Image (cartoon, rainbow, N blue to C red):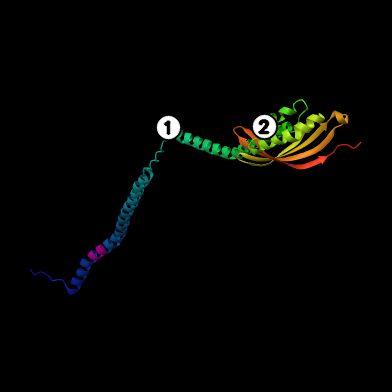
Amino acid sequence: MEDQQPAAGDLTETAETAVTPETDATAETGETAEPVAETEAAEGDSPEEGEAAEAEAAEAEAAEPVKQTKPAKPPKPKRKRRPGRLAAVVVALVAALFIGSSAFAAAMVQPYLAERATVEIKLKVARAAANAITTLWSYTPENMDTLADRAGRYLTGDFGAQYRKFVEEKVVGPNKQLKITNSTEVTGVAVESLDGPNATVIVYTNTTATTPLKKNIPSLQYLSYRMSMKREGDRWLVTRMTTITSLDVTPQL
């Protein structure tokens, strides 16, 4: 009994039939695989992106605490001043102010004190000149003999001797005989100059002379003198005297 070979057409059909299931399977498999691949790809992309996002979030979280927990620089401690040093500075300032104010006060007071001292000296000179003039030209018939001695206390040098000679020759003799009483009143004194122990003074006077021989009718004279004075010790004495003005104001009857 021989085996029957299939015909060519049968082989083709068989082949086609055999291939067809594979092709169908392949087609089916291919159609089904494409979505699976896409799904896998989609699923595969999500984990990577999620990991990247998680990494970025972790980095951000890690960075934030570093910024927040960065330690601030501690403030510089203030230097404490010692009370003793501060007290020394205050004392020094007070001392400087005191010295400055004292110097200023001294500078302001010094001219005042100097001027006041000068005024006091001038007053002393003026008093000495007024007392000298009053004594030199005031006398009575009873004390005329002692006039030179009394006046000598206010005179010095050659002028003392000159005055004594004048009194003895021109005053005592004639005026004692006529019983003249002479009275001098100082009406004004001016210190013309003051230079250390030397001074020049102008003295203004009214002099009245009376005598019983003329019924005691007064003779009036207005006289002014320039006197040079010198300080000896604590006294001012006359060294020279000249008449500046001599005016007879006796009323004519």
The kind of residue tagged 2 is Gly
Residue 122 in view of the camera: no
Q: Which residues are magenta?
A: 22-26
* Residue 130 magenta: no
* Residue 23 magenta: yes
Task: Name the outermost residue toward the right.
Answer: 253
**Residue 84: assigned label:** 1
* Horizontal and vertical percent position of residue 229: 65, 38
* Horizontal and vertical percent position of residue 41: 30, 58
Q: Secondary structure at mark 2?
A: helix
User: Which quadrant does the N terminus fall into?
Assistant: bottom left
Q: Secondary structure at mark 1?
A: helix
Q: Name the one closer to the observer, 175 or 185.
A: 175
Q: Is residue 1 left or right of residue 48?
A: left
Residue drawn at x 72%, y 36% is 166
**Numbered marks: total:** 2
Q: CA distance from mark 2 to mark 1?
A: 72 Å
Q: Name the one closer to the observer, 73 or 111.
A: 111
Q: Is residue 65 left or right of residue 206?
A: left
Residue 203 in view of the camera: yes
Which residue is tagged 2? Answer: 152
